[in-house]
Amino acid sequence: MSPSPVRAADVDAAAQRFSTTIPPTPLQHNERLSTRHGLDVRLKREDLTPVRSYKVRGAYNFISQLSAEQRERGVVCASAGNHAQGVAFACESLGVAARVYLPRTTPRQKRQRVARFGGSHVEVIVLGDTYDDADAAARADAADSGMTLIPAFDDPRTIAGQGTVIREVVQQLGKAPDAVVVPVGGGGLLAGTLTWLRENHPQVRVIGAEPQGAASMALALDRGEPSPVDDLDPFVDGAAVRVVGRNPHAIAALDPPDLVAVPEGQICVEILDLYQSDGIISEPAGALSPAALAQDLGLAPGSTVVSLISGGNNDVSRYAEIVERALVFEGRKHYFLVEFPQEPGALRRFLDDVLGPDDDIALFEYVKRNNRETGPALVGLELGAPENLDPILKRMEAIPHRIQQVPPDSPLFHFLV
């Protein structure tokens, strides 16, 4: 097997390059997660970097090492949003021009921040439906223009910069943690973490948390090479990468870390808990690591576990979908197709006969009116507790309406959530 393309010394050198530009982010004990999981959970707040994401570390480390000629030609990158902000920040700081490609799924808030950080140094181009679409366009641009491509994760310089997160953690903690949970998209942060820990603290357990709908590193390790995820869920936009990088894969394959696939609904639950309980604004990829703690990770009680809040660039317009996904995941939101008699009071009687005192109707829409006697409607119910569902289903069986539950794996369900 080939040696690692990155060494711990590269991570140390990266930390020195931006030591006066990118201040250390806090490492905070979290009482909620510690109590819930029986662990000593420390949150590494990468959402508090100048661009609200760890991505600035890799971007700055890469661009700061460019030759004078390369800086003069400029750089180009693709990103789901956070890497672009890191590139924009670095380019404005170092006086380098950049073209940044973003997929259309990038939240507007991230697009605006890229433009703000880069100022006159950065041109933003929005195209494609996924990160991989934007990446293909950026690579073609670099080949045609001679500008330097700044990979979001698949380059030793990017990986070394991202590896400074765990180096900083150990310095702040005063010792190595028992375990670290790292969010995984393209694999740069995971690769940098593995590299530095293997040479300095090989006993630390590294757990990679992937979105269930974009588990590209697990697929790559299983197949022995980076391979595309067939059915990619783009919801966790900062980590929804169809194919991991070859450099990150090579580093991970040397001694594969533990990987866990986290359901998108669980991530939404954690986003809301971080906001409501801890006052932390997290994007989906930022909540990926603490959400993974709800899985069976096999950690010894009382272990010191570091979990990375990798980004805080969440668009407020996404919260409605986040709440919806969280309710569905927790079993508190359900949808039904109900055939109602076309007469006054039909809906009121249905609610009186079916709902419990803590349940509520969240959606009512007629699908169509096919005759004078009946009409099918889509009904969404929000339950006071998940265990209320079985009594509701039993009460539905006792009334004359024709009722069909819409399961979460139904194609119709995807039009609702």
Image: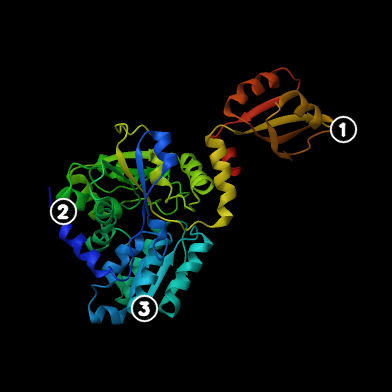
Residue at screen point 24% across, 47% down = 225
Q: Residue 79's quadrant in the figure?
A: bottom left
Q: Tell me the amino acid under the disc marked 2.
A: Ser
Q: CA distance from mark 2 to mark 1?
A: 72 Å
Q: Position of residue 259 (x, y in %)?
A: 31, 40
- Residue 344's disc is 1
Residue at screen point 12% across, 47% down = 1
Q: Residues within 10 Å of mark 3 (few under 14, many from 20)?
A: many
Is disc 3 placed on a helix, strand or loop? loop
Q: Tell me the amino acid under the disc marked 1.
A: Pro
Residue under circle 3?
Answer: 97
Is disc 1 placed on a helix, strand or loop? loop
Q: Tell me the amino acid under the disc marked 3.
A: Ala
Is 255 left, or right, of 146 in this rendering? left
Number of marks in the image? Answer: 3
Q: Residues within 10 Å of mark 2 (few under 14, many from 20)?
A: some
Q: Residue 72's quadrant in the figure?
A: bottom left
Q: CA distance from mark 1 to mark 3?
A: 66 Å
- Residue 4's disc is 2
Residue at screen point 26% across, 44% down = 177
Residue at screen point 27% across, 41% down = 179
Tell me whether circle 2 and circle 3 mark residues in contact (CB < 8 Å).
Answer: no
Q: CA distance from mark 2 to mark 3?
A: 31 Å
Tell me whether circle 1 and circle 3 mark residues in contact (CB < 8 Å).
Answer: no
Which of marks 1 and 2 precedes in the sequence?
2
Which of marks 3 and 1 precedes in the sequence?
3
Q: Position of residue 124 (x, y in %)?
A: 45, 71
Q: Residue 188's quadrant in the figure?
A: bottom left
* Quadrant of the drawing holding the C terminus: top right
Image vertical order of residue 119 relative to residue 60, above or below: below
Q: Residues within 10 Å of mark 1 (few under 14, many from 20)?
A: few
